[in-house]
Image (tube, rainbow, N blue to C red):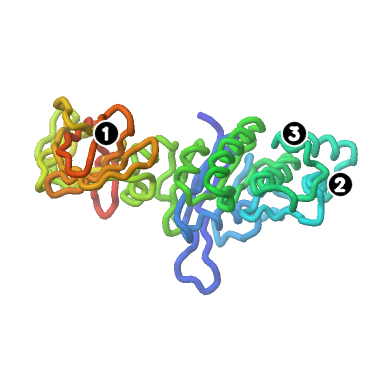
Amino acid sequence: MSQAFVDVRDLTKIYLGQKVASVDDVSFTLEKGKMLALLGPSGCGKTTILRMIAGLIEPSSGSIIVDGREIANVPVHRRGIGMVFQAYALFPHLSVEQNVSFGLEMRNVPRAEREQRVRQALELVKLAHLAGRRVTQLSGGQQQRIAIARSLVIEPSILLLDEPLSNLDAKLRDEMRSEIREIQSRTGTTTIFVTHDQEEALSMADCIAVMSAGRIEQIGTPQEIYDRPATRFVADFIGRGNFIDGTVVRAESGTAMVEVPGLGAIQVAHSEPVGGKVELLIRPHRIEVGLNLPTATNHFRGTVREVVYTGEMRSLTVAVGNLSMMVDSPTRGAGEIRRGDSVGLAFAADDVTVIVAKSGEEVAR
């Protein structure tokens, strides 16, 4: 079992005058060299956690252990942590090289070593050719890479990124996701970043902690979070989904049949207690659609009510019994589908996630 490099235990923050904690008893671990995303809506406490790790906010209680050392009471400048702020916080009156060199100068690193490390950091982010420019002459993506170089040049134990892509346009955000992931992989720097963007978290992180109202709802790999959400909140926040209420009417050999009013029975690949009320999640892209489909484990017919063309995919709204289901279909390979068409829908039992209400808690299977 890998040793935890970052170990956050029972971390809580209650601001003066607050009755409800901004961060409520949060615990998680992170292996050395891995990247964790703190994902959630605005106000859920993710940035507060990042700032407590950085030393910019004092915890109300709990501990923050990095490489076996408790740092909750260690001053900011002695934590060895690099942080890239949402607005980059670069010095506009200094050159690129001077910005990157600033942290080393504050640490009294000798000039020769300083110059070498600055050069290496700029080469890492592929901007060595712009060393003499003012940062105000750079694009948003270039400024972000300079902010990352400035954080990495001090050789931090952890790199913290606060909404690193929020100030960029859509195309540049896509490019910078790959850039940041590549830089992190090459340096092997343990990294924690905050985002409200699910695609950003899924595409960049080794591990995702989904947060709501100051607490972690679920922590796991991107695939675990997406395919097996632990709660309705996680299922709804990550990706799009069809949520269907039903009752378990039969269970045998590790499978169950769930009766859905106005639709019929759906087979799921999990054994559930007969009579139990459950909620099913089926992702739109897991549903096969066509004018004529062969019989599958779960198959239904419906009428197309809406077709939205998005380039590589078509997003369909299909009326099936009493339900309205979202279906994502590639624009090639399934034939032309129009509004008003009668279509077949099919999906496997393994493509259904079961969210079961138990003692006020939700458990996904």
Q: Three-letter amino acid code at disc 1?
A: Asp
Indicate whether 196 appears above or below 182.
below
Marks 1 and 3 close (CB-CB < 8 Å): no
Q: Which mark is residue 351?
A: 1
Q: Three-letter amino acid code at disc 2?
A: Asn
Q: Report, in whole angstroms, how far the alpha carbon at label 2 lies from the one at label 3.
A: 22 Å
Mark 1 closeness class: few <14, some 14–19, many ≥20 residues within 10 Å: some
Q: Three-letter amino acid code at disc 3?
A: Glu
Marks 2 and 1 close (CB-CB < 8 Å): no
- The location of residue 286, given as percent across then percent down, is 29, 34
Q: Count the labels in the image.
A: 3
Q: Quadrant of the C terminus?
A: top left
Mark 3 closeness class: few <14, some 14–19, many ≥20 residues within 10 Å: some
Indicate whether 293 appears above or below 338.
above
- The location of residue 125, given as percent across then percent down, is 70, 37
- Earlier residue among tags 2 and 3: 2
- Which residue is identified by label 2? 108
In the rendered structure, the answer to whether residue 78 lies left or right of residue 309 reads right
Q: Report, in whole angstroms, how far the alpha carbon at label 1 lies from the one at label 3.
A: 45 Å
Residue 355 seen in the figure: no
Query: Which residue corresponds to the image point at 45% horizontal and 52% vertical from the top-left?
Result: 40
**Number of the front mark, 2 or 3:** 3
- Which residue is identified by label 3? 123
- Earlier residue among tags 1 and 3: 3
In the rendered structure, the answer to whether residue 126 lies left or right of residue 167 reads right
Query: Which residue corresponds to the image point at 64% horizontal and 45% vertical from the top-left?
Result: 141
Secondary element at image label 1: helix
Q: Report, in whole angstroms, how far the alpha carbon at label 2 lies from the one at label 1.
A: 57 Å
- The location of residue 288, given as percent across then percent down, is 24, 32
Camera-nearest residue between 365 and 242 = 242
In the rendered structure, the answer to whether residue 83 lies left or right of residue 265 reads right
Indicate whether 335 appears above or below 163.
above
